[in-house]
Image (cartoon, grey):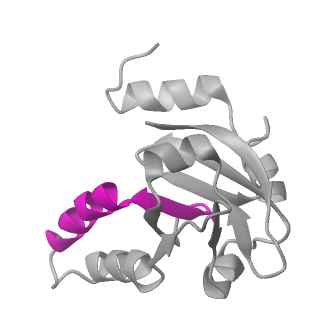
Amino acid sequence: MLIGEYEHSLDVKGRMILPAKIREDLGEKFIITKGLDGCLFGFSQSEWSNFEEKLKTLPLTNKNARDFVRFFLSGAVEEVVDKQGRFLIPSNLREYASLDKETVITGVGTRIEIWNKEEWKKYNSSENLSAEQIAENMANLGVLGI
């Protein structure tokens, strides 16, 4: 399971080090693509296959479904970790997620998220996230409380 929060830097070529613990779970080859909330998503090859299978079930006749599929697939790239543990984030994905030098990688179960460090701080701030409100919202969705 992908968990944890790791701060890393992009080099001038747009490469970053994938933390060893994340690399163990994600693999040496993985997929990154545009994510939600302004970050990038990274999937192991098996999780990406599961995600693709779900996308294939969406109706081609539904515009929202087509938009959803385009959003995730158009920016997707397969990445390979080099001998130094680095991988390249293409410029279009760096631009999408406003990635500059300082980044944060978070493990969120079945995927990683790659954030601009300042955007992560804003997202994770007490003004934006309230554990109590999240728990209440999850209870409203039928997820049992902790």
Is residue 89 highlighted in magenta? Answer: no
Q: Nearer the viewer, residue 53 or 119?
A: 53
Is residue 54 highlighted in magenta? Answer: yes
Q: Residue at x 76, y 71 (%)?
A: 99
> Left or right of 35: which side holds 102?
right
Q: Position of residue 22 (x, y in %)?
A: 55, 45
Q: Position of residue 34 (x, y in %)?
A: 52, 72
Q: Nearer the viewer, residue 27 or 135?
A: 27
- Quadrant of the rendered structure where residue 12 is? bottom right
> Left or right of 44: which side holds 52?
left
Q: Residue furthest top?
A: 146
Q: Residue at x 71, y 65 (%)?
A: 16
Q: Residue at x 36, y 18 (%)?
A: 144
Say above or below: 53 vs 111: below
Q: Position of residue 111 (x, y in %)?
A: 46, 51
- Quadrant of the rendered structure where residue 103 is? bottom right
Q: Position of residue 30 (x, y in %)?
A: 44, 64
- Quadrant of the rendered structure where residue 78 is? bottom left
Please identify the quadrant where the N terminus is shown. Answer: top left
Say above or below: 96 vs 29: below
All told, the count of numbered labels is 0
Q: Which stretch did the figure color magenta?
A: 36-57
Q: Residue at x 81, y 47 (%)?
A: 121
Say above or below: 21 vs 45: above
